[in-house]
Amino acid sequence: MDKETLQQFEAQCFQEEPPACQTSCPLHLDARALAACLSAGKAAEARKILDRHMPLSGLSAYLCEGPCQAGCRRQELDRGLDLPLLERYCLSRTRAARFMAMPPTGRKIALLGAGLSSLALAWELARKGHQVRIFHQGPPGGRLRALPEDRLPEKALSEALEGLGKLKAALAETLYSPEKFKEIQADYPIVFLGGDDPELRPDLIGLRRADIQPDPTTLLLAGGRLLARPPLEDGGHRYIDDLAAARRAAGSIERLLQGVPPDSARAGEEVYATRLQVNLEGVAVKEPAPPADPRRPTEAEAAAEAGRCLQCQCLECVKNCVYLRHYQGYPKKTAREAYGLISTAFGIHTANTMVLSCAECGQCREICPNGADLGRIIGLLRQQMVETGHMPVSAHEFALEDMLFSNSIAFFRHQPGRTRSRWLFFPGCQLPASLPRAAARLYEHLSGHLDGGLGLMAACCGAPARWSGRPRLTEESAAFIGRAWAEAGRPTVITACPSCTLFFQDRLPDMPLKSLWTVLAELPLPEGAVTGPPLALHDPCSARMDQATRKSARDLMAKLGQPFSEPPLGGRLTRCCGYGGLASAANPGLADDFARDRSADTEAPLAAYCVMCRDRLRAVGHPTLHLLDLLFPEKSPAEALKRPGPGISDRQENRRAFRLNALKEFWAEEPEEDQAMDVTMHIPEELAELLEKRRILRSDLAGVLKAARAEGPQFVNRETGRHLACLRPRQVTFWVEYSPRADGSFDIHDAYGHRMLVPGVPGEGADSAASREGFDPMGGRR
Amino acid sequence: MSTINRELPEIKAGGWRCRKCGRDLQPVTVDLTYVGSSFRVELPGCPDCGLVFIPPELALGKMLEVEKLLEDK
Ligand code: SF4
Ligand code: SF4
Ligand code: SF4
Ligand SMILES: [Zn+2]
């Protein structure tokens, strides 16, 4: 993934955009942060924010009219936050930080007029070390002097002037005249006219009012070295505009001094509408409580007002994604962090697990007002990890081995008695793994109703290869299916699993597809179909964009007469069960939290039409059944809701059984029985659970035991008499501690594996990362 | 990678002996390899044929930890 892709994506997530209060403040004061400090009682911290954004904060904060209040999102609910009140409170409790002026630059700037704009500008410039002189007529402060004490304490002005003095900004009382003005212009390369000081009348310095029309962006007048806050029209004056003018003029002057065009890079200085999206749904109305003395709010009053701030954020997608919450991120941040960590050539790749834990489920994209799709970026980052050799080998290996296992027993047959298929039923790898008998009954049902021949193909679609970020393996897997489909005569493929549908749409675009659920909804109900208690219908994330399939599932429920409800966040916004993107392979604990989130959505038992969703939701304890449990029941719905999903070994054995039984039942074939399991093992239940967690298959144990039966175990215990045998059939070494029984079977005491290569261990498995994709398909169990 | 050696917990042979050679296990030096990195450690093994014994606590503990570390490099 290149930097540009990242930047384009970052631009799509608006979480870091400033809140509305800030973009409607001409000084872009961070009101959100200020309110956060004050509601936490941190006045000193709040003062630092004021000082950072406001020139001469001790004076200006009394004066600002608070245009942010109208921009504040609370205004839509009750009243915008009273920032002027909070600022006054801050001033009453704190002192301005001492600012150190930078070393003198020797650059001279003259300011005419001593109104607020000149004072503020003097402060900005003097701090930078420039030599500032304010030429004024009459006492400095201009119209500020006329303000009543309760609007502006006199002390505030005198302290501001004192502060300017400390910064060596000199005040020079003068009598304005055209000659004086010329003299000043001759002495000072840059001159500012503070027209908000009523003493500075244009005619006094030989100008007409019409001459003072500065460029709105730079405040420069023709000639390029005279700037102005234009003289005030009657009425409509705001002190905040004086401050904004000072800020703007300071920006222009800095550019002039550095020889940069004064209008360069000035976007965003003005007041604008933020792009930050804030969801106000469910926010309670909370009218402000006016303070007893508005000029001097108490700490509690200030904290109460500050507490009304919503701390505006977007995070809409984060609220609903357990992955983003877990990593305390949001799409922009998570993408940036992951990209940074993945792209570093050196050091520890701590982001690996983070990148591998996203379910690539597309929920964030559908929730985001801008369609920011983190899952897509994660997919690209995984590919990058594979390309640069940073993909941890172990993360997806089991899932990929499982996929290859499915394909090692893949088969295709035309419908019995036919040589052509108009249709092809593709149950995928997980339906036969979880519901092998229902899958067989389903084939029977479909083939009895569809015209033109219904072939059957059992295999894995290849989606796990793509989730694992391995382009070559993805290509090979898709090609494997593509070839078989072409040989079958390019029939319309009926997919049971929406993930297969997605994968084929993407990789085999010529393949005509029809969802099993649409087909079933169109056919008569199978005999023996039952209904259960009221259920909540869970849509799999892979059907998020597949409105037709989602509708068919509902049609089918209705046809069946099965009462059902919609859980929150269904349809296009549905939650992932944690299997998506192989999240459950790389981060099983977090993946379970995905399922728990869904479980928490509803009290009702769930119905799923993706078998992985069904098994994963059941695994976190939520009563869940699969639609096929109703259509082709083996047990009552009540039992189906509680049926535990099969373990990893059962899944493979179920696939084997599905194949054997289908070939026998439908095609009257006598397939050779599989040799893998001709070892009888006795495994205590607790150990069986451990093996599940360690992802060790019963067939792995059988392999070790068969080798030990032929060659003898590696170790024997002289105290317990137990045997210990090891074998490295692939990129994992397995150790099995066991006792042989007289009847040739084995008591298993323990089994474990490691990926490190230990010399002397028999078996063909090499060191990991044998190929660039870190996973050599040919090294798999075939 | 020699640091790994020092960090290894002490592994007890726990009564195991080599089936082929009939020898009790003694500390032997062996090179372990993972994703292309090799390092030398001392583990209980057969003094004759050199095969080392990997107990579950080593495979599921320190070894797993080092595997993850090397994968994340
Ligand atoms: S609620 Fe707070 S963060 Fe949001 S606009 Fe108002 S002051 Fe700003
Ligand atoms: S898990 Fe789904 S919602 Fe969460 S970030 Fe990944 S793709 Fe987005
Ligand atoms: S919904 Fe998520 S991705 Fe979209 S702007 Fe908000 S935080 Fe960013
Ligand atoms: Zn030996």
Image (cartoon, coloured by chain):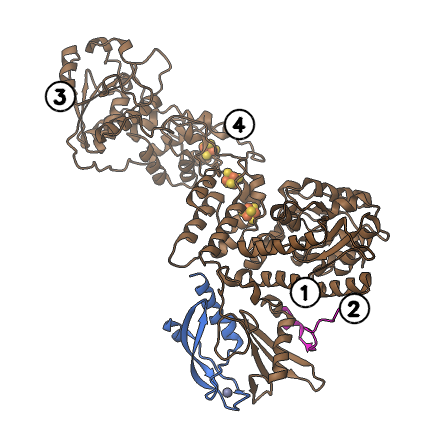
Q: What residue is shown with label 3?
A: A187
- First in sequence: mark 3 or mark 1? 3
Residue type at mark 1? Gln
Q: What residue is shown with label 2?
A: A670
Q: Find residue A43 and report its horizontal and vertical position in percent.
A: 36, 38
Q: Is residue A436 above or below residue A548?
A: below
Residue type at mark 3? Asp
Indicate which disc residue A652 carries.
Answer: 1
Mark 1–mark 4 Cα distance, whole angstroms, equals 58 Å
Q: Is residue A673 magenta?
A: yes
Q: What residue is shown with label 4?
A: A76
A535 lies left or right of A352: right
Mark 2–mark 4 Cα distance, whole angstroms, equals 74 Å
Q: Find residue B15 and report its horizontal and vertical position in percent.
A: 53, 87
Q: Which of the chains bears the disc numbered 1?
A: A
Q: Nearer the viewer, mark 3 or mark 4?
A: 3
- First in sequence: mark 2 or mark 3? 3
Q: Nearer the viewer, mark 3 or mark 1?
A: 1
